[in-house]
Image: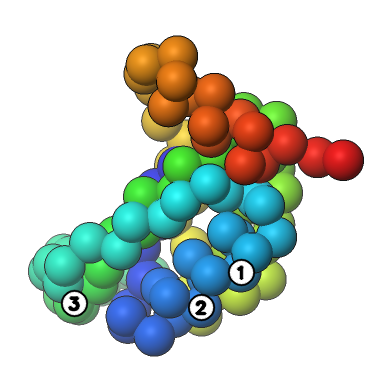
Amino acid sequence: MLTTVPSLELGERIARSLVEDRLAACVNILPPMVSIYRWKGTVEKEEERQLVVKTSRARVADVERRIADLHSYDLPELLVVPVQGSRAYCGWVAGETATG
């Protein structure tokens, strides 16, 4: 999953919450980037960081809820990107995000 945040501090807070509660196996916080977007009729320019959230399909809704609860944006970016990976790595993600 992908989302963006306005600061490193918020990115770390979201990442830690997701990993500690087993909603994600890992979250990468990428370096600052510039985002240009249209919001409420105005073109905006902001510095943001992208979070890459490694989770299982079964945890997507839980991750969405947690990000919505912790995020400072009215409308946080929440993109689900289906991936294929090695059996070992995907097994690790599944194990780290398993419920029960």
Task: Look at the numbered disc 1 and give the secondary structure of its residue.
Answer: helix
The quadrant in which residue 91 appears is: top right
Q: Quadrant of the N terminus?
A: top left
The quadrant in which residue 96 appears is: top right
Separation of marks 1 and 3 at Cα, in angstroms:
23 Å
Pick whichever of labels 2 and 3 is earlier in the sequence. 2
Which residue is labeled 1 in the image?
17
Which residue is labeled 2 in the image?
13
State the residue at coordinates (22%, 61%): 30
- Residues at marks 1 and 2 touching, judged by CB atoms closer than 8 Å: yes
- Mark 1 Cα shell of 10 Å, populated few (<14), some (14-19), many (≥20): some
Separation of marks 1 and 2 at Cα, in angstroms:
6 Å
Q: Is residue 95 above or below residue 22?
A: above
Q: How many marks?
A: 3
State the residue at coordinates (80%, 40%): 99
The quadrant in which residue 68 appears is: bottom right
Which residue is labeled 3 in the image?
47
State the residue at coordinates (53%, 70%): 16
Q: Amino acid at mark 3?
A: Glu
The x, y position of residue 29, in whole percent, is 30, 63
